[in-house]
Amino acid sequence: MQKTAGLIKKRVLELLADGTVTKVLGWKEGDFIYDVTPASFLSAQEADGLVYSSFCGANLSKYLISECKALTEGKILALLKPCDTYSFNQLLTEHRIDRDKVYVIGVGCKGMLDIEKIKAMGIKGITKVIDNGKELDIKTIYGSKTCKREDALLEKCLCCKSKNFKAFDEIIDPEPETKEEKADRFAKVSELEAMTAEERYAFWQEQLSKCIRCNACRNVCPACSCMKCVFDNPVSGVSSKANTDSFEEKMFHIIRAFHVAGRCTDCGECSRVCPQNIPLHLLNRKFIKDINELYGEYQAGEEVGSRAPLADFTFDDAEPSVVNERGNS
Amino acid sequence: MKKIEKAKLNDLLARLAEASTLYLPVRKGGKVNFAKWTKDEEYCADELKTVKSAKDVFFPQSENIVSFKRESSKITILPKELPTDRTVIFGVRACDAKSFDILDSVFMSEPADSFYTARRNSAVIITTACSTPEETCFCGVFGIDPANPGADIQTWFVGEELFWEALSEKGKALTEELSDMLSDADEKEVEDEKSRISEITKQLPLNGLSLENFGGDKTNELFDAAQWEKLSQSCIGCGTCTFVCPTCQCYDIRDYDTGNDIRRYRCWDSCMYSDFTMCAHGTNRPTQLQRFRQRFMHKLVYFPANNNGEFSCVGCGRCVSSCPISMNIAKVIKSFGGDNK
Amino acid sequence: MQVSENTENKEFKPLIVAFCCNWCSYAGADLAGTSRLSYPAEVKIIRVPCSCRVNPMFILKAFEKGADGVIMCGCHPGDCHYSTGNYYARRRMTLLFSMLDYLGIDRARTRVEWVSAAEGQKFSLVMNDFAKTVTELGENIKLGDLRCKKQQD
């Protein structure tokens, strides 16, 4: 990681200096190791704060929508991890960003860390995390702690889609990940499907009732790129700034997931940002699983220009009654 | 000063829940928040900070305030009754306790908010000292002492006992009610714990922030400052910071048509939202930079200007740990030269 | 809009919202009427230009306001007035119903049927059958806004 970070910085400075790019989209270091902020850098001096660490989980591709619109000359350099390139492709497919205005550097990734998971292990007062590759050395105000790196991975990294870049102008990945083992991303979905309707209802009721309607899941989502969201439109009849009834959180989360069905690359940002840790990815993955099973394997953002399953059909698609025929519960 | 064995704490809670509505930090779906306590719930005493603050109890995220019903040509207006039941909030931290004072100056100054005032007046607040302050805490910046959390009753967990000190009249009355469960204790027994907490507080990385560049008279200097652009550039405009914040108090009022009647409800609003304070002409803060600036200027400049220099932040650090892009009030203070390290 | 008006006395009668496309299913309902075929009075028909017009939010909105079952009817696949509208609708509804099922909501409360303008009899049969199914399931308490229930404070 350290090596990659060094190479990235060097290359970013070169590209800024020779005028290939006029702006750089990356991550800025924070007060502690884990609180990096997405940021743009206009000069070599500003780029001093650029970091690339195990806490750069944030997907930068959505920022390119506004950046591309605002860019008047030159190109903007975007640092994208392999999974971020799927979102990038999906935005290209939907004509939300301009490929000619972006210079993509694919940056190697070994899986990003989730500070919430580390805190949930009971490690408090974290001031620094040193990533040794296998173990994490954690400095806290209550002394040093260690934990296994794999226990602190972000949910999205546990089921990494790929370490390959789907879009790039160049790649900086000095130590490419070779092992391809990954967890089944639909395991939890299948587990829920196997439950009875009552159990599923109880599970979701408990999870969704935590929702505070902060809209972080929607606002961070690279697929949620409407100019005005239906939930922000007071005349839509569904806009609500807080849940008064438990119906509203169900409505919001079903519709949020439905609006990105077939376009969601499963980047996992929604679950990463949720302050209440609601497993929102399980809603998205349910749609992905259904689409794969009913309409053929489809990975949004795999290639530019592919037709989204919900904007497509075949004459012999399954009838909606298929839902009744699957499973027994 | 009184004390009770930790093992008997549940009996004490049960007693409190009998005579009043008891709120305390409980775990639901893996996350700890203040909620109504029942015998099956476990009090999460070790959780330093709940996700949402305790302000929900007095200022719920959403509440009906009045309903309208039409029968033929007659329209009936049914105001919601004011809550009068006694409420006890247990396990409030020093920062949240202080936030109630800030909310009071908003909701209880004339014209007073009747719902908030009714709830506030019928509540007894029991605070707990922070045995393990975290790196995101910076309440010391606002003069808050986590070793002496204040409010009606303050408590400390020391070893296998909970020490209990009533401060206000309300607190003393409640302590009297519980006198058969509490035994007498010496103040010296919590001295060590207090000094231990103070020692930790001194080491907290954000506790050295300085607010000298902020205050009620700084509007002109800060409003057009160049820093806002960089600070707000990656803000995604969600409401996480405002909804977890103990002092954010903005709300919206809307109507809901149930088909049988119209419910007028108020719900939390966020200045980070694009439709915040939307009027007929549109929104008065069309860019995220303006919305972002509004939030921090309100906390650090406008609020002190109207409230004798008091800042509307208590340094609880919830925004520090929950912002999706890790931008927060501590970084804002630092970028205006408030880093005293 | 008000769709809840029953539940007050004894026997449970479900509220059913039927979205019918203008060109086939609504005409089918019309034919059922002119042919004097009966279907339950609890079925409230909402006419839409095409089954493809039915936004998933419409279905949820109907449940919010107190529906116990929601059915969507359109032209038979291949017969859409707009050629392909019902093919898109078919995918949408399949995924939506699957999601409702995933959230633990009784899947029999939602249904899609293709009813042509000549199928007055089918319309009547479908509605009778769906009403029977929903009556057996009872009142929908999992997916509705409590504020819309009449007895509430």
Image (cartoon, coloured by chain):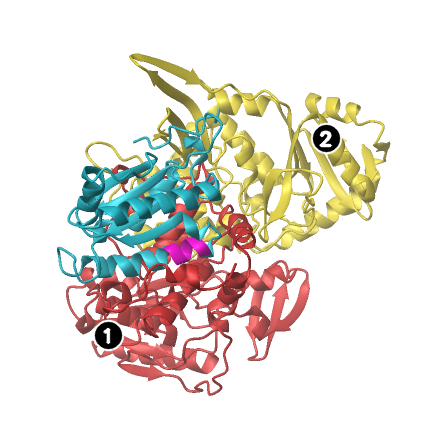
- Compared to A143, does C66 lie above or below? above
> Which quarter of the rendering shows the N terminus of chain B?
top right
Q: Residues within 10 Å of mark 1 (few under 14, many from 20)?
A: some
On whether residue C100 falls in the magenta region, the answer is: yes
Residue B231 is at least partly visible in this image: no
The answer for which chain carries disc 1 is A
Residue A271 in the image, given as x and y percentages of width and height: 46, 59
Query: Chain in red?
Result: A
Residue at the (47%, 25%) spot, across then down: C9
Q: Which residues are magenta?
A: C97-101
Check the residue under mark 2 and report the chain it is in: B
User: Residue B98 versus residue C18: which sits nearer the camera?
Assistant: C18
Q: Is residue B168 above or below residue C118?
A: above
Distance, label 1 to label 2, CA atoms, is 62 Å
Q: Position of residue B164 (x, y in %)?
A: 77, 35
Asked whether, in this view, residue B305 is left or right of residue C41, the answer is: right
Q: Residue at x 32, y 56 (%)?
A: C93
Which color has been applied to chain C in this rendered view?
cyan
Label number found at residue B16:
2
* C-beta proximity under 8 Å, tags 1 and 2: no
Disc 2 marks a residue whose amino acid type is Leu
Rendered shade, chain B: yellow
Please name the amino acid that badge 1 sits on. Val
Depth check, mark 1 against mark 2: the one in front is 1
Whole-percent x and y of residue A276?
51, 51
Q: Nearer the viewer, residue B134 or C116?
A: C116
Residue at 46% in and 88% down: A178
A24 versus A213 height, above or below? below
